[in-house]
Amino acid sequence: MQIESTDRIQRRIKIAIAWCLGYSPTLNRGVQLQALRDRFYGDLPCSDSLQSIVDAVVNLMREDLELPKQIVEIQSLIQDRPLLWEQRIGMVYGGATKIKQYVFEAAKLQEIRGASALLDNINLVDLPAFFHGDEDLDPEYFPECQSAKEYCQKIRHEWLETDSSLAGLAYALIPELIIYSTGGNILAFCPSEVVDRLANAIEKRYTSETLTANSCAVGAIFKPLEIKFGLLPDEITDETFWFADYQKAYQNPETQKFISGYVAPQLTTADGLWEAFCQRKSFNELTSNLAVLFNQRRSGNPEIGRPSRQFPVMFETHPYLRRDGGDKRSAIAQVKLLPDEPWYSESAARKRLVGQIAKREDITDNWYRRLGLQWRPNSRIETWVRKYERFLSKQSLIDRYFEGKERVTEEARSLREIGNVCRGFVAYIYADGNNMGGYIQKIKTPQEYQKFSRDIFTATEQSVYKALAEHLHPHRLQGLTDPESEGRNGKWIHPFEIITIGGDDVMLVVPADKALAISKTLGEEFEKHLAGIPEYQISGDEDRSKIHRYQPTTAEPSASSLSMSTGVLITAETTPIYYAEDLTNQLLKSAKERSKLLKPHGYYGGTVDFLVLKSVTMISSNIKEFRQEGLVKSAGDLKLKFYAAPYTLHELGGLIEVVQTLRTAEFPKSQLYQIRSLLDRGKRTAILNYRYFRVRLKPDGQKVLKDQFEFGWCDAETNNGSLAPWMYYTESDAQDKSGYETIWRDLVDLYDFVTVKTENATQLNR
């Protein structure tokens, strides 16, 4: 029977709730599960013993079952369906914490890759395996589990069936219980009897596999009726505090702020109180409760009946013992069978081994076996590049990507190999979703949570693949001389590294000259994908003149309520990874701040901030301070900003076009630098020098520069003239602050890192 996606999710949630309500350690698991699947997937009749549970679940999940306004209505519902009040259902929420600390503590890409793959394997394979994800009837759910059935069965046998502290857990779990398990976290229903055992198993799995990664999992027990109506007191009486009491308290100035804080902090009048109350009293309140418990446990607060997290995993070190490559823990051995002969702790050795498996390296694991360690990873770890290759095949993009090049393509093993594409420079891309928190607050049901999670993960993953396929092609390595690259010259590689794709966030390493184009396409494809789904569609009601500085009338209005902000760092392949990651994270925060400032003008699209770092010593403090102290100059009552980042996606496209125009016109680099050096002499001096250099170009070059740069970016506010190379701006968060900014410094920085389009390669200044 073919079931549409939304209806299928609804049926899965019904099975999950019915399973929890009817679970008993003595029931026949296979018979009960099959009966529920027959009833909800196949619409077949069920036994009398299950009928009361099925009826209660169907009644609970009715779309017309709305939040009662009067307390007497809740009392009536409890009398009609006592099972929804008397029974209990468990929920568990958990996942890895301080992920970047674990992944980026290593200095080598191989170990970073392994750390990321190890966490992905736990999140996408190990934890769903607890729930028998490999036995799910729907192939679209848990594909990683279904391709590693023996591994999943081994996990349940060695973990859940033989560990006395987790006894009976595998018997109590089914695939439909999982609401979502992407983005580094898992949210799932479970029978109330196994809540603590499941939370403990999640934390234990992370620790046993990684040794050093932090994780946290919490659980709580709820009444089934709370899935629909949010948290409720243990007794419902005529005196129970309900909407009429909230309404009365809101009208009292002394208690209004407390009601607003609970129901809706943004509420300003009583008119929207009922709508806000309905929004609050839903499944969202249960997940908020779990999030509070999660934060409390993560902070080290004790939890009755569970092992404490006050003391995280720690390995003793000694000042006179050799440490591993990350200088974090005592090394257990030096591995001379690897090219760089590294010193490894057990945690670092696991990362390197998993990194080799993930990248399908032809180096054997003999070095690991010789260490005498008992731990063994999943030998079928699914990498993002393998998924990317399958995506190319499904989308018929294979020929376009390979362009007739060698199809026996390997994955890049180091930053040096990625940097081999662009003169030793690479780019770190860190993208994260915008407006996600606000949208989640509007979700009222578990099926909406599941659909949202699947929609966002699919949009993110496919957007990454499309961006990489559009702008990259296999690269043949050449000129590598370091010992780690021995025998690699002449190999064809995928010239990128997908560090992680988790929920709505992405971390990539790509060749420097493709970074901005990839970032732009990534953001556009993400919005395009979600704009095709009714729940995320918006009408483009925005003031484009206050949003875009580049040809605002040509900009497409926002079509999706969700988007991506991106930080891009272009730097040398030798830049320490932990330093590059920190700067990229700062750029992402800057881009997200720009997005928030533009939101009042109706802009819901993506933003990008970037930095070209040609020297590690270029920035000694954070990027914001560097820009404020070094790239901003006061000129009387006005400010001169020698940069214009962050950019909207539309502006970024215009910036790339200007750089391509300059390169196509063969604009002399010496003149680019000279104009940049004259910016800090003041607005008029910079304008005069720019015009002097422009008129020295050939007529065709002048025309293109005027069309693309001056008319595109530098129109005056009060007349039809041009302020090139300046733009007038007014800060969005303070109308009394204004000044002039320029994209010229950004143009100079990007000159060597933007590829000229082949069709525009004609020299305009012949």
Image (cartoon, rainbow, N blue to C red):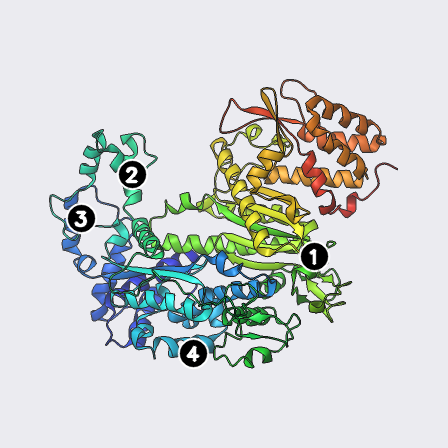
The residue to which callout 4 is attached is 154
| Mark 2 vs mark 1, CA separation in Å | 51 Å
Of residues 679 and 131, the one nearer the viewer is 679
Query: What's the amino acid at mark 4?
Result: Lys
| Mark 3 vs mark 2, CA separation in Å | 24 Å
Of residues 521 and 309, the one nearer the viewer is 309
Residue furthest top in the image: 719
Residue furthest front in the image: 320
Q: Nearer the viewer, mark 4 or mark 3?
A: 4
For residue 698, side relative to residue 135 (left or right): right
Badge 4 crowding class, 10 Å Cα cut-off, few under 14, some 14 to 19, many 20 or more, is: few
Q: Determine which of the numbered discs, if any, sits on residue 261 in the image.
A: 2
Element under disc 3: helix
* Residue at screen point 74% across, 41% down: 660
Q: Which of marks 4 and 1 is in front?
A: 1
Is 528 situated above or below 411?
A: above
The residue to which callout 3 is attached is 74
Query: What's the amino acid at mark 2?
Result: Gly
For residue 333, side relative to residue 83 (left or right): right
Confirm or deny contact between disc 4 and disc 1 (CB under 8 A).
no
The residue to which callout 1 is attached is 419
If you read the primary sequence from the N terminus, does the residue marked by circle 3 or circle 2 appear first?
Answer: 3
| Mark 4 vs mark 1, CA separation in Å | 40 Å
Query: What's the amino acid at mark 3?
Result: Ile
Confirm or deny contact between disc 4 and disc 3 (CB under 8 A).
no
Badge 1 crowding class, 10 Å Cα cut-off, few under 14, some 14 to 19, many 20 or more, is: many
Query: What's the amino acid at mark 1?
Result: Gly
If you read the primary sequence from the N terminus, does the residue marked by circle 4 or circle 1 appear first?
Answer: 4
Q: In which quarter of the image is residue 300?
A: bottom left
